[in-house]
Image (cartoon, coloured by chain):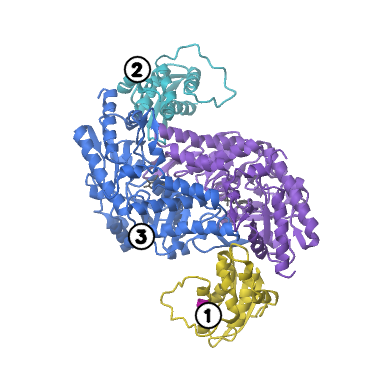
Chain colours: A cyan, B yellow, C purple, D blue
Amino acid sequence: MPGLEDLYREIILDHYRTPRNRGELAPPAVRAEGHNPLCGDEIQVYLDVKDGVVSDIKIGGQGCSISQSSASMMSAAVKGKSVDEIRNLVRRFKNMMSIEEEDENAPPLDESKPLGDLEALRGVVKFPVRIKCATLAWNTLLDGLSQSN
Amino acid sequence: MPGLEDLYREIILDHYRTPRNRGELAPPAVRAEGHNPLCGDEIQVYLDVKDGVVSDIKIGGQGCSISQSSASMMSAAVKGKSVDEIRNLVRRFKNMMSIEEEDENAPPLDESKPLGDLEALRGVVKFPVRIKCATLAWNTLLDGLSQSN
Amino acid sequence: MSFDPVVVKKDFPLLEREINGKPVVYLDSANTSQKPRQVIDAMSRFMETSYAPINRSAYHLAAESTDAFEGARGAVRRFINAPRVNEVVFTKNATEALNLVAHSWGGANLRQGDAVVLTHMEHHANIVPWHMLAAERGVELRWVPLTSDGQLDLSDLPKLLDGAKVFSFTAMSNVLGTLTPVKQLVDAAHAAGAVAIVDGCQYVPHNPTDVQAWGADFLAFSSHKLCGPSGIGVLWGRESLLDAMPPFLGGGNMIADVRLDGFSCAELPAKFEAGTPPITEAIGMHAAISYLCALGMDNVRAHEAEIAAYAIGTLKARYGDDITIHGPTDPAVRGATLSFQFKDVHPHDVSQVLDQANVCVRAGHHCAKPLMKLLGSNATARASFYIYNSTADADALADALANAGDLFGL
Amino acid sequence: MSFDPVVVKKDFPLLEREINGKPVVYLDSANTSQKPRQVIDAMSRFMETSYAPINRSAYHLAAESTDAFEGARGAVRRFINAPRVNEVVFTKNATEALNLVAHSWGGANLRQGDAVVLTHMEHHANIVPWHMLAAERGVELRWVPLTSDGQLDLSDLPKLLDGAKVFSFTAMSNVLGTLTPVKQLVDAAHAAGAVAIVDGCQYVPHNPTDVQAWGADFLAFSSHKLCGPSGIGVLWGRESLLDAMPPFLGGGNMIADVRLDGFSCAELPAKFEAGTPPITEAIGMHAAISYLCALGMDNVRAHEAEIAAYAIGTLKARYGDDITIHGPTDPAVRGATLSFQFKDVHPHDVSQVLDQANVCVRAGHHCAKPLMKLLGSNATARASFYIYNSTADADALADALANAGDLFGL
Ligand SMILES: Cc1ncc(COP(=O)(O)O)c(C=O)c1O
Ligand SMILES: Cc1ncc(COP(=O)(O)O)c(C=O)c1O
């Protein structure tokens, strides 16, 4: 069994204790809501999308250290990026979580930029039950992006 | 395992080959229909009930040697008897088939008269699956009697 | 034959049993199949070492058990060549699977006056749910008739399908052994704009199955007929159809959210799996599928065509016109399920006499009363063969039958 | 204690398992229970020697297997003291049992504007089926609130029940461990003219059950929580109610007759048991019931009251205000199912840390989201004890918890 240190990296605990971009955005910002039906974690992702760019993002909801820190890191990584860049990032993150690509016709993955803080979540793969915690925010983000179309 | 000779007594085969009281009765005779949902046996029992007496009975339907011979013997045993006598007989027959009494308030059983040919069906008890075949006609008879009330 | 049924039989502990000093000749596999040691052991081992909740708890043991459970889903996907694993829904049996489709897809899509096409050889599991729907909302049921040798009579199929919303049919008759032309039926359904539902209860255990080659929309089957445990069945459906369907049973696992004023559904397949699933049973079914795949489903089919030919040949040679075998005689269009009438002996009595020799056949309506009516009786005796039955079992059947005629003086 | 849980534990092979050299401390029995050797062996033995179809075929083996299956029904009847054996319906789990009642009794008896009363501590299995009915036909759901210590607040019960047709409630909360006053609730339901449905999932495995003493109308529970196999559950209902209800699933076994133009239903209990039932699972459940009865259900209850008191005492002594244990503290009105909040550590993380010590607890909403909302969070950690858990397991839980606070620097 892998040790807890693989899961609870210091940087994860930091994002958990001090989450970035907590809050809400008023309409016309998009609001997407995600549930982890297995454990009850809930998340709200608010997005301001202008000219194909996520100019602002806020996160609401409750969850465990993994889902909360993943949401926090995501918000930091996404803010100010273009929708295309973000979609690329979501795919990279899901790959890292060993989730198979669903869309065979997707464009080639751009892995040139470093993942930064997000790398710290790589250890989650060793705890398969927690993968759903880590990806909750990201799936909710995707939902928000498609609403903004 | 009990031998087949316990089941297929000569008298049973005789009633099977030469069933008594086959046919139908026209209305106002009562018509009751029974199914053995497990094997598909079907039976129709027609009853003329006058002044508390079954003055005539006819049997229709299809089934195996046990259900057919039981129906034939029943028709012979029942014809001309009073409804009370018949209800007593049905209870005796079911007892013989090891079926528990449902009605705790039933009157005491009169076992003074011999069962006659019906005794031959006693061997069916050793073949529990066939008990439903043997009792099909009797349950249908009960149904007919309650219709005639 | 590519496997030896006599060798296969050694994997099935029950078939070593003797009653009154004589071995059991099990010819009732169309009803339910026996279980190999591999399945029994997989279930015991799972309960002894890995049993834990599925999809609910986060500890190591629960993750292990969830993996094993979802592994079974993957095995089913491969076994029937379904495109996606989330299209595989575990039910309690094929009956629940067919009720699920009738209730959920039918409930959402069928209106007063819509037509559902069934065949005259369907099992009650593929009739009664449609009767219930018909009674509830005035749906019309239409019936594909049969030819005299027990195949589907397709001459009027386009007319029957005209305007129909559903065509639901068996891939193999549990009474006649008839294999139906599934791909052709699916194509005809689609040409008419109807969804094609395949009852694979009898087919899947005995033949290689490929839902994509068929182009079918739904497939239902049960574990207990394919050497797996009782208590679990499968509904496969196209993702797009399942996704659009309302839920069936409500409760734990099938929800995304529950509030005092309503609920929302989970993703597939959880949406259709309310409550604690048949966990150990999924493990057992996985072992059964692995067992069958190791034999090779092509070989299973070849064995059964052979044994059907042998059994029909033997019975006919021995009893001539005293025996009527229902359904097609050509082994190319039938499996090894033989319904027969012997002289004038009632099937129930036939089965009783055979039982004295421990030859286990079913007598009755086989949950196909409309077909019985068509055959002009209300019961048949049925001998059904599987991977563990050899020509010796067909001989035992033929031998034991002789007594039936004698006893009734026929 | 009248039995020694350390001795009982030796009957459960899985509990001898070690992960990373440390034994498993299984505290998730409210989710699903482990299986004793006696159950595992009964299932294996049945598949090895007696497995055959139920209620369909007439040969010796089938009669034997039918007897064993119906024997299980008799055992269930005695276990819950039901008046008649045909009132015991086998389902796939408790969820199906509750759906059956909601769909069939509710479908036949509830009309627009009718009220169904539930409690705020229900499991989704006793909520979602009523939501589905409510959406379908405009039925009103009313909720019995809770007191601050997690018991039912009955002060407004007569008002809530006024004009209600159904009162459906759990006999024991799967989150709080609360035992509800079943007889009082049944009486209140009847006084208001409502039927009383008891969700016995958590209660029946842990307490002596007597449906006649309760005077209840329906009872639902699952085998897998009472040391029996997955894949089978029970609905008990009063004969007069079951008799008057329309069928639920349609197919084989539940019919008296099927024609092209309709069908008629079989007698109880077959009417509600469509398709091939969970045969081996019934045998396993019978073995589980026999196992529990040998321990004595009074003793089981006494053991759990004791272990609940010990665990609550130990955790409180050790962690004081750092731990909040939900639900009543008096062992007289609770079972040994403890939901708790530890410092500010999220339950999911608590369970992860405990898992490092092989202490298996569930973290999540426990399929009771409305209750979670009331508790002001969306998850709890839950340790649930059963016959094989001793005070040593409570100590292991307390020990392992220390790490959770450390890790998060709390
Ligand atoms: C109180 C209660 N009701 C209903 C259920 C549902 O039982 P099952 O999942 O076995 O159908 C459970 C268990 O999950 C429960 O604890
Ligand atoms: C063709 C067919 N369909 C449906 C069924 C129903 O299967 P189950 O009883 O396992 O639900 C059967 C078997 O009984 C069958 O042979």
For the residues marked 1 and 3, what is the alpha-carbon distance in whole angstroms? 36 Å
Please check whether the numbered discs 2 and 3 fall on a single chain. Answer: no
Q: Is residue C36 above or below residue C23?
A: above
Please check whether the numbered discs 1 and 3 fall on a single chain. Answer: no
For the residues marked 2 and 3, what is the alpha-carbon distance in whole angstroms? 56 Å
Amino acid on which the number 1 mark rests in the picture: Leu
Magenta region: which residues? B88-92
C304 or C90, nearer to the observer: C304
Q: Quadrant of residue A125?
A: top left
Q: Residue at x 33, y 29 (%)?
A: D357
In percent of width and height, residue B37 lies at 58, 63
The secondary structure type at the circle numbered 3 is: helix
The secondary structure type at the circle numbered 2 is: helix
- Chain containing the residue with disc 2: A
- Chain containing the residue with disc 3: D
User: Disc 1 marks which residue?
Assistant: B89
Q: Quadrant of residue D250?
A: bottom right
Q: Quadrant of the N terminus of chain A?
A: top left
User: Disc 2 marks which residue?
Assistant: A11
Q: Nearer the viewer, mark 1 or mark 3?
A: 1
Amino acid on which the number 2 mark rests in the picture: Ile
Q: Nearer the viewer, mark 2 or mark 3?
A: 3
Instruction: Say if residue C190 shows up in the picture.
Output: no
Dominant secondary structure of the residues highlighted in magenta in the image: helix
Q: Which mark is residue D211?
A: 3
In percent of width and height, residue D148 lies at 23, 44
For the residues marked 1 and 2, what is the alpha-carbon distance in whole angstroms? 87 Å
Instruction: Say if residue C120 shows up in the picture.
Output: yes
Q: Is residue B93 above or below residue D215?
A: below
Q: Which mark is residue A34?
A: none
